Image (cartoon, grey):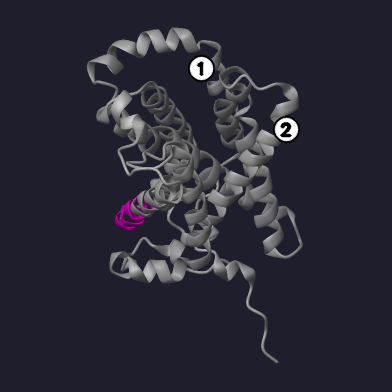
Amino acid sequence: MSSTPSPLRRWRVDLPGIRETSWPVVAAVILVAAGYPTLVWANRELILSLTRSIVDATDGFVQPTLLLYLPVLLLVVGGVMLWVGRLRLRDLSLRRGDLRTGVVVTVGVWLLMQVVGIVALLWAGEPIRLNDTWLTGGALAAIGALVAQLFGNALYEEVVFRAFLLNQFRHKLRRRLTTAPRWSVLLALVASQAVFALIHVPSRLVGDGLTLGQLGPTLVLLFVWGTLLAVVYYRTGNLFVTIGIHAFMNAPTMLVGPPDAGVLTAIALGALIAVLWPRIERFTDASRLHDADDSHRQSSN
């Protein structure tokens, strides 16, 4: 009688290959992740005035988002996770061997977003022309918004909430649960993405001006987005793929067509990647890039 394959065999993140850190380090990361956005939004006008000279000098290429996330990346990743927590970059799924595949998939997603943008204009009977964001703010500002995501916000959130919290919660739950391993994955996913949703409360209340009544549905949507990104990360084992999709969800950088079409396309393609990843991986020829450090490609048990 053949045994049923474990659902965890579909995942590409091998937990035994990732070091576990202590609860105080996990708590410190959560506190900074929650406190930093609150501090930023409480001093939003001051921060914008302090960064305006740099933004103006670069014609918008260097944006406040990038300037705000570089210090917290250094503090949380470099200081708390790597130095205090004794983790390595590969424990955060930041592997050089994954970078090329991540870039190829990210560029492919962006090109498909442009195709959808063209189709959306044709469907609406509108002329195909350059998106207004490139005309009003300038090309440097449009590119800068994406750069700020790839090297700032999206990079930070993927490392913290997907590569770090999800795996650390899973480490700790696995030792305490006597049930099937899939339950530790499920509970760790729910807990980490709940934290991801909740840290957006200050920006939604202050930045977007939402009421408490409007906050609930927004937090549910953020939880769903976080869960999708977590599934993409676990299916691909490649954090750079997830960073690219996350960046386009925040800054679609559409050449043509409405930005909303780009955001929806990025979400849909993220879901498609999660379903079809083994075939997409072969298409990108990622097998040539495997090195001795790619233990995360093995099945989790």
Label 1 neighbourhood size at 10 Å, few (<14), some (14-19), many (20+)? some
Residue 190 is at least partly visible in this image: yes
Q: Is residue 32 above or below residue 131?
A: above
Q: Amino acid at mark 1?
A: Val
Q: Residue at x 41, y 22 (%)?
A: 68
Rounded to the nearest whole Å, what is the CA distance between mark 1 and mark 2? Answer: 22 Å
Task: Choose between 94 and 267: the one closer to the eye.
Answer: 267
**Of callouts 1 and 2, which one flags the residue occurring earlier in the amino acid sequence?**
1
Residue 40, labelled with which disc?
1
Q: Residue at x 49, y 40 (%)?
A: 260
Residue 50, labelled with which disc?
none
Q: Residue at x 31, y 68 (%)?
A: 285
Instruction: From the viewer's perspective, tell me whether residue 264 is left or right of residue 78.
Output: right
Task: Choose between 50 and 97: the one closer to the eye.
Answer: 50
Q: Is residue 271 above or below residue 256?
A: below
- What is the secondary structure assignment of the residue under circle 1? helix
In this view, the mark in front (1 or 2): 2
Residue 279 falls inside the magenta stretch: no
Quarter of the image holding residue 221?
Answer: top right
Residue 101 falls inside the magenta stretch: yes
Residue 88 is at least partly visible in this image: no
Residue contact at pointers 1 and 2, CB within 8 angstroms: no
Identify residue for label 2.
216
Q: Is residue 157 above or below residue 275?
A: above
Q: Magenta region's main secondary structure? A: helix
Q: Is residue 29 above or below residue 115?
A: above
Residue 123: give x, y in percent of width and height.
45, 51
Task: Choose between 165 and 210: the one closer to the eye.
Answer: 210
